[in-house]
Image (cartoon, rainbow, N blue to C red):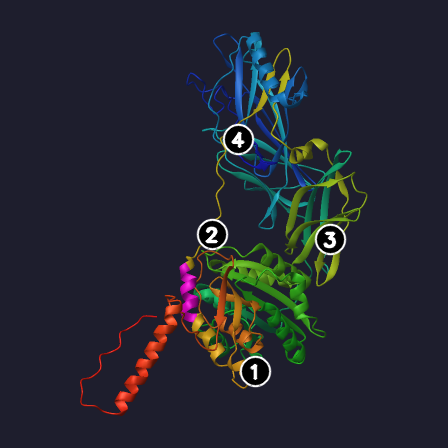
Amino acid sequence: MSMRMSITNTRWVFAVWGALALCRTGIGLAAGGHAPSPSPAPHRIAIDARGPLALVEVTRLLVPERSESGGGEAVLDLALPDGAALSSVEVHEGGRWRSLEAPTTGGAGAVQAADLYRAESVARGVTPAAEPFDEGATHRLRFLRGGARAIAPVEVRIRFALVPIFDGGRLRVRFPAAPERLPPPADVTVRARGAADLDIAGVRTTFPGDAGTATGRASMRAPWEVSWAVRAQAASATPALDARVAMTALAPGETALAFLVKNRSVRPAGAPGNVLFLVDRSRSVGLPGLSAERELTRRLIEALPPSTRFDALFFDRGTRRLFSMSRPATREAIDAFENEMVPDRLQNGTDLATALREAGELLRREQSTFGPRALLVLVTDGALGDDLDGAALDRALAPTPGLELSLAAFAIRPVDDEPIGPRTRKALRAFAGARGGVARELRANEIGDAVPAALAALARGGDLGAIRLSADGAERAIADSLEPDAVLSGVLTLHGKPPHQLLVEGTARGRRVVATPSATAISTAWLQPWLGTGAPRARVLATPTVVGLLEPVLHPATAQPTEVKGSMDRMVIRNVLSLAYMPRARACYLNRTGATPALRDLAGRVRLAIDVVRGEVDRATVESSTLDNPEIESCLRESAFAIEVPRAARSDAPVTAILNMVFHARTPDKKPAVDLGTVGSEIDLVIEEMHRQEASASASPTTGPAPAPAPAIAH
């Protein structure tokens, strides 16, 4: 079975799931092209779900292939399931299990292990196979024998641990298909403490409880899994956490800890009677995003009971209310909302904090209308800026005394758009956790499934925010949020000795939720592989009857895929600002009053920074100014929000345009292109005298010939 995982920058590959005997190639064919003989013993897999970990033990036989010199060697490329860490590789020899160990002689251990194996192979008359590695292999396992037992089977036991993943309401341990062409089935034994039911390779089994085990069979020809549901506990009136912890001391100053945390849902509450939508209508939403927001809001209204009343606040840099008072969700009211979700309503700027303040004031002012239970739904594209966090959003909304208010925050984007930024995601999750609500990031094609799931999670108490582990008072963040009945698991290290007091904490509606787990005793060998540093080391075993080698496989370094970011030509934004903004900036200056000579002759320089995000002007800031005129400076800032800017494709990164503007009451006289020096004044005098003569001649007409024109002189 080929499975992959990164463990401290090392992928372990473990292909032991077939029961066919492996030979020199390690992939099912001998060097001479003959298929290996069948394994004489069954393939056994034992899984022990202990606390937050699943401990897996695989036992099977390898049959060496006889070489021309009379010895025999078996070669196997190794691979682990995703999320697993190899604990040990052992061989049964002399009536007991012998482990392959890393040499204890420093950095040259890998070379010494390989040299020892080669020396032992020469002594037994075996030439080590030189076969290409499997594409996904990172380690190769070799065993050899000599003499009369050259092709005697070698019984191997491989142990590894992994943290089960949580998906679809169940904990799962997933295995891929076996690499063999005709793999025999494997006998699977599972023990899962605290499980309500058990599924082995798609077959539901009768589970005897904590004290017993369940058995099943896996064909190994296709990917398969073992899954179980955690035994449900009675729902409580308030949010609660359930936690399991496994802990072991690795060294005097280091402790390994595996955890599994569940958010126990509360008793379902009724649907809210009133809903206030806070809808992002800034230009960054764009046309596809506007359609997605409209669809999401309509689905939410239709999923609530017909008696639900709703109202909406649209926000960009400011806010605008849809109705003068909340209305029932009639077809006419829904159409009125959709008529506002049109492209010409999009405006530059996004000020969520101000929108939340106005929403809070509205809810407090009309408490009798929205009470006793109301739902605030935030619908946005997630372009909210990096200066906001969950605490700031919660402060902006402020308490709503006398009103039981829930929150649902949706960040929705088109299918082909990039994800929202990590800071925005963290802020929305913290905001929802503080209010006992839910925060979801959606794509436009996920609305149908996400809306009922979010409302169901809201009825079960909402997400817990700021999940953290406290060990003797020292806190470690685990996750930003945890959905109702969801499970969170992982492995981490702590500095120092194993702590005496462990707490798992979360936040719900501003209150602290605490669980006090008891640590499960577990061997250090199961957790040690997660915490290793440096390159993997070779392991070797040499006995009079068998020699084994586990060696790392070196692959050429592959280039990591770089994140694709959108770009915009500098001339594009330059042209937009020249054609759309500069006339407005000129109007700001020309519309000043001339009440005083200082205003009439006002001159100075202004340096303006315009931040452009996702096709909208997000911020305009006067960085410096010598005009000393707040009215003109304010007009310059406001005028920036009146223009339409291009959108960099697939990029949320802000673009800052810097404008340096110079203002004068009148255009300065142009200086002469050529300096004539002292001669210039004499020429000016001659020209002035000629002008006087021409003026006097035109005043007194004569009968003589007209005077010759003066020569043209370029200044």
Of residue 277 and residue 68, the one placed in the foreground of this image is: 277
Amino acid type indicated by mark 2: Lys
| Of pointers 2 and 3, the one earlier in the residue sequence | 3
Q: Mark 2, mark 1: which one is toward the viewer? A: 2
Question: Which residue matches tag 4?
Answer: 185
Amino acid type indicated by mark 1: Ser
Question: Which residue matches tag 3?
Answer: 505
Predominant SS of the magenta segment: helix
Q: Mark 4, mark 1: which one is toward the viewer? A: 1
Rendered location of residue 154, percent (x, y): 58, 18
Q: Which mark is residue 324?
A: 1
Q: For the image shown, how many numbered marks are present on the structure?
A: 4
| Of pointers 2 and 4, the one earlier in the residue sequence | 4
Region in magenta = 571-580
- For label 3, the SS is strand
Question: Which residue matches tag 2?
Answer: 565
Distance Cα–Cα, label 3 vs label 1? 42 Å
Vertical position of residue 424 compared to residue 311: above or below:
above
Vertical position of residue 229 compared to residue 66: above or below:
below
Distance Cα–Cα, label 2 vs label 3? 38 Å
| Left-right relation of 357 to 296 | right
Question: Label 1 crowding class (10 Å Cα cut-off): few <14, some 14-19, many 20+?
Answer: few
Please say if the residues under marks 2 and 1 sit with CB atoms less than 8 Å apart. no
